[in-house]
Amino acid sequence: MKKFFLQAFFFTAIAVFPVRLMGQVSSTVTDINVDANIIAPISVENTGSTHINFGTITRSTTAGTVTVSPTNDISCTDGATVLGTTHSAATFKATGEPSAQYSIGFSDCTLYTNDEAYSMIVDGFTTNANKQLDANGIEEFAIGATLHVKASQATGTYTGTLDVTISYQ
């Protein structure tokens, strides 16, 4: 019977006082480093005063498109015909953190006559950028686009503005 009471006492003690029988609670502290890295801002500039120029286009009764590639190649569809060789892609220089990757964004672009009575849409922007700055933090690239010429487009000089935005990735 003594054995029974002794076993009952130990089981009760373990059930009622488990922490005291299992030992002490301890805690530890460790240090970690906290870092920050500030990099140069990224920027883009149009170089050489070169802008996207679709050249001189003849008017037609059929709508068409004129596309200037980043390598200054030109192509026309349907009723659009370009005369001469005054077309050009726009050239740019991106600068920022060496070897950094970036993305390029384009705003909507509409060309208007001087009195804004007539318009043409520009879209389909393409670039020959690698979208990564070199070891000196520079990349030069060009941008081309497609101009949509309406059937019987009004004659005149058309101009517009394109916003080119670059951002780190």
Image (cartoon, rainbow, N blue to C red):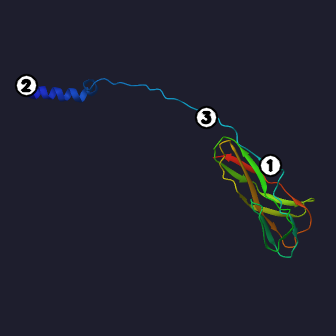
In the figure, is residue 116 to the left or right of 4? right
Vertical placement of residue 135 versus 83, above or below: above
Give percent across and percent down for residue 88: 81, 59
Contact flag, marks 1 and 3 (Cβ < 8 Å): no
What residue did someone put label 1 on? 47
Give percent across and percent down for residue 115: 93, 59
Contact flag, marks 2 and 1 (Cβ < 8 Å): no
* Quarter holding residue 78: bottom right
Compare marks 1 and 3 and give the one earlier in the sequence: 3
> Which label was assigned to residue 37?
3
Residue for point 86% across, 76% down: 61
* Quarter holding residue 150: bottom right
Task: Nearest to the eye among marks 1 and 3: give it.
Answer: 1
What residue did someone put label 2 on? 2
The amino acid sitting under disc 1 is Thr
The amino acid sitting under disc 3 is Asn
Task: Nearest to the eye among marks 3 and 2: give it.
Answer: 3
Q: Which SS class for mark 2?
A: helix
Contact flag, marks 3 and 2 (Cβ < 8 Å): no
Compare marks 3 and 2 and give the one earlier in the sequence: 2
Q: Residues within 10 Å of mark 2 (few under 14, many from 20)?
A: few
Residue for point 12% across, 25% down: 6
Residue for point 82% across, 50% down: 48
